[in-house]
Image (spheres, rainbow, N blue to C red):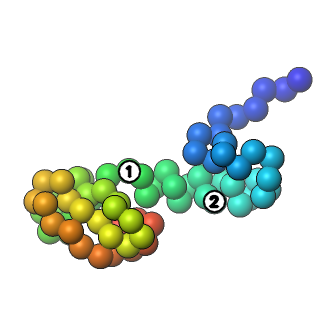
Amino acid sequence: MARTKHAKSIARFGPRYGARVKTKTKAIESKQRKKQKCPYCKKFSSKRISKGLWECKTCKRKYALGAYYIE
């Protein structure tokens, strides 16, 4: 039996939904969970609170930008 790749955050889907959907979801989720660059203080300290809402841990600002990641 062949070994499978580590699925990380998409392991919750199991065998459902197909490979293409799961790889796209994995790419988006891994990017959105990283710390993003704050547009005000220019440091990598912004985290996503909810859809489109971000908070910078350094300058303590909350702002609305992209739903998944800051562009």
On the image, the x and y values in percent for residue 57 come to 18, 54
Query: At label 1, which amino acid type do we have?
Result: Lys
- Residue under numbered circle 2: 24
Relative to 30, 5 lies left or right: right
- Residue 71, visible in the rendered structure: no
**Measured along the vertical axis of the image, is residue 38 above or below residue 52?**
above
Q: Position of residue 18 (x, y in %)?
A: 79, 56
Q: Residue at x 20, y 59 (%)?
A: 56
- Report which quarter residue 51 is drawn in: bottom left
Label located before the other in sequence (2 or 1): 2
Specify the quadrant of the image occupied by residue 20.
Answer: bottom right
Which residue in the structure is indicated by mark 1?
Answer: 34
**Marks 2 and 1 close (CB-CB < 8 Å):** no
Q: How many neighbours does mark 2 have within 10 angstroms: few (below 14), some (14-19), or many (20 or more)? A: few
Q: Is residue 35 above or below residue 67?
A: above
Residue at 51% over, 55% down = 29
**Residue at image location 61% in from the left, 58% down from the top:** 25
Q: Residue at x 59, y 40 (%)?
A: 8
Number of residue marks: 2
Vertical position of residue 6 compared to residue 29: above or below: above
SS at mark 2?
Answer: helix
Q: Which mark is residue 9?
A: none
Quarter of the picture containing the N terminus is: top right
